[in-house]
Image (tube, helix red, strand yellow):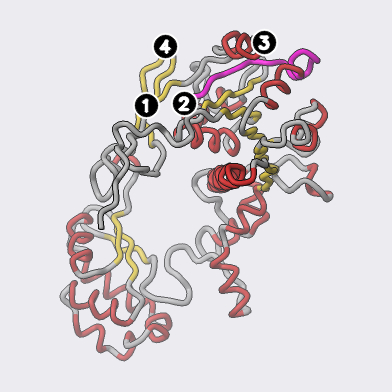
Amino acid sequence: MTTSQPTSEKAPPPLQGLRVVELGQYIAAPAAGQMLADLGADVIKIEPPGGDASRRVGWVHDDYGPMFSAYNRGKRSVMLDLRGTEGQLQARRLALGADVVLANSRPGALEKLGLGADQLLPEAPRLVYGRVSAFGQTGPASIRAGFDIAAQAESGMMSLNGEAGRDPVRVGYTAVDVLAAHSLATGVLAALVRRGITGRGALVDLSLIDVAISALTYTWAEYRQSGQMPVRRGNGQPTVAPAADVIQTRDGMVVLSAYMDEHFVRLCKTIGRPELAQDPRFANNPARVSHRAELMSLLKEAMSHFDSDALVDMLAEGGIVSGAIRDMSQVRPGHAGVSADLFVDVHASGRTLINIPGLPINLDGIQRRPGRLPGLGEHTNEVLANLES
């Protein structure tokens, strides 16, 4: 029995024909909008007269700062002053005519403008409304301003990150905002699937604090089952060894995990030290955890004379999980498993193009596409003219 496969050259993007109105700044909603745009949706970004604040965050050279460049390619920009009645009416008409609305704001802010979910959904029952808040929609904390870093702090995430005996450290990128964007896009896509069955839209509601706590589910399971408070300890995992441990090489560092007994035996054989697997100090995982310092000293001695890539290749042949620790200049498309077409060109008026990661999903071979960043309000007349016709 054979099954036909879609012809990727002719297949349209999966969200082609869907319209998304984005009422968001910074990362969470715009990054979700970027994912939907990459999947083919027409994303209309409503910006205030000064533009999305991310256009100028940490940037003074033009209106296309790094944060804006990362999450806004391929969208259309409509500039509306939502402080005035006319701007509110135009934004409302755009939202009511859309398939999806994306928003990230403090609870009540969009409701004051007539653009809240409770105001739009009764008039547009097929609308999927996705919103992100910092600390939920109700309760005393809901009125707080909140960025990624606040959610990292209050979720427990920062308490786990860093070296033992030193201050907590934030994750080195806006992890919660990015996870929230992925969660928002997932919820919106699920709601669109259900709408295709029932004809009914939905409210997709999430908060940065819930997303951050959910990201720690494995750690929560360890805490609930052991009763032991997780603590930051830098590299390495507290209950298994070797696990997420760093090895200095001749030209850099690698991280490796081989904590299952059979994996540890293979590791020792692969690095030419099979006798370590027979050492009573390392005979099983509890023993290795108890003697982690001695174990790591011996492993580092055995592997320090290798180059990182050569060591990773050797460990891979032995079935051992490892990875060379690279800085961003060392990450290359088509190398070490990175898709050759992962990076896409992003253009902006008056600026040299930049090459950044695109959507990490490969869907029936549909090619990742380059994109152009919209100028502030560039599509206002075009979009509003169609709205009035």
The span picked out in magenta is 74-88
- How many neighbours does mark 3 have within 10 angstroms: few (below 14), some (14-19), or many (20 or more)? few
Disc 2 marks a residue whose amino acid type is: Arg
What residue did someone put label 1 on? Answer: 370
Q: Residue furthest bottom?
A: 280
Q: Quadrant of the C terminus?
A: top right
What residue did someone put label 2 on? Answer: 73
Upstream in sequence: badge 2 or badge 4: 2
Q: Residue furthest front?
A: 1
- How many neighbours does mark 1 have within 10 angstroms: few (below 14), some (14-19), or many (20 or more)? some
What residue did someone put label 3 on? Answer: 388
What residue is drawn where x is 32% and y is 53%?
325
Measured in 3D between alpha carbons, the distance from the residue under mark 3 to the one under mark 1, in whole angstroms, is 31 Å
**Is the Cβ of the residue at disc 3 closer than 8 Å to that at disc 1?**
no
The nearer-to-camera label among 4 and 3 is: 3
User: Does the magenta portion include 82?
Assistant: yes
The quarter of the picture where residue 123 lies is top right
